[in-house]
Amino acid sequence: MSWRTVVISSSAKLDYQMGYMVVRSAETTKILVDEIRSVMIESTAVSLSAALLAELVKNKVKVIFCDQKRNPSSELIPYYGSFDTSGKIRTQIAWNKDIKTAVWTEIVTEKIRKQKEHLVSMQKQEASLLGEYLNQIEFGDVTNREGHAAKVYFNALFGHEFTRSEDCNENAALNYGYSIILSAFTREVAANGYLTQLGLFHDNRANPFNLASDLMEPFRPLVDRIVLTMELKQFLHAEKMELVGVLSQQVIMNDRSEYVDNAIQIYCRSVFDALNDHDVSEIRFYRNMQK
């Protein structure tokens, strides 16, 4: 089972040799490709060989490229994530509105539930209001309880003056952490043979990751928990590495302890089963570890 997240943050040359990714910088390091879950190229002073990229794609390793500000800007996605991709895409296009709306309702309900649990753990009184929103959710969340819950939730965590559009270290950290989670979901969508562009609720023509954007919602509070523990007088390399670790956290999935990366795999497959079988009871959500 692959499990490593490799971050390349300085000038280096990367190539492939006999099953290993070779990183040549001040020192030369060899990492077994079979052990790599994802590679983040944080510096623009990095060169990679085509042979290495082909092997990473073959082994379904997620490769994320960052821009000059070291923020994730693009990623490597294989054309063919599954042997039966053509059939999966036909199936995806045929998902009807009722089942997509039913699955979205389950997802957004779980997101609010996770936000409420976070506020309870922080002993925030606003948790009771999110509990009321949970009881008010209608099919398809037509009354936008998700939006109301988000405003209450973020104000409870970061103060009443905080908005998600504000240019501040907290939002930079949240956005960076969410991009890490999003990349894990795009990998799973592609690996299962589906198109990331065709979402359940998200339907932005400019968003190539609509389906991943739908699926990731209940996992956002995992990032929120990390950001809330950070002092964030600055948001630089050390803070980013702390957020990269979100995929290595452990949660409970099917009554077992799983890394978040593995939990995302199990959850995505359960959502695809629910969509294909028209049965939302097949969706499996994670639970936080008891502390």
Image (cartoon, helix red, strand yellow):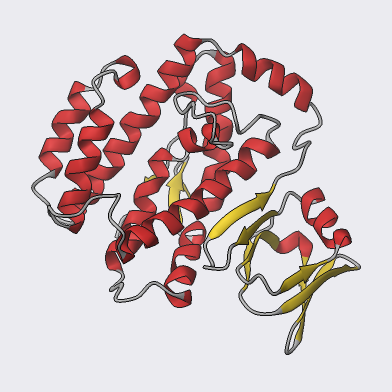
Residue 259 appearing in the image? no
Is residue 197 or residue 274 the one in the foreground? Answer: 197
Spot occupied by residue 56 in the image (x, y as percentages of width and height) = 78, 56
Residue 76 appearing in the image? yes
Position of 189 compared to 77: left or right? left
Spot occupied by residue 229 in the image (x, y as percentages of width and height) = 29, 67
Is residue 271 or residue 165 the one in the foreground? Answer: 165
Q: Is residue 215 above or below residue 238?
A: above
Q: Quarter of the image holding residue 37? A: bottom right
Spot occupied by residue 252 in the image (x, y as percentages of width and height) = 43, 48
Exactly how many numbered labels are in the figure?
0
- Extreme bottom residue here? 26
The residue at 38%/61% (across/down) is: 172
Spot occupied by residue 97 in the image (x, y as percentages of width and height) = 48, 11
The residue at 39%/72% (across/down) is: 235
- Extreme right residue here? 18
Q: Quarter of the image holding residue 195? A: top right
Query: Which quadrant of the figure contains the C terminus?
Result: bottom left
Query: Which quadrant of the figure contains the N terminus?
Result: bottom right
Q: Is residue 236 above or below residue 175?
A: below
The residue at 33%/58% (across/down) is: 171
Position of 59 compared to 133: left or right? right
- Extreme left residue here? 125
The residue at 60%/68% (across/down) is: 42
Is residue 24 or residue 133 the one in the foreground? Answer: 24
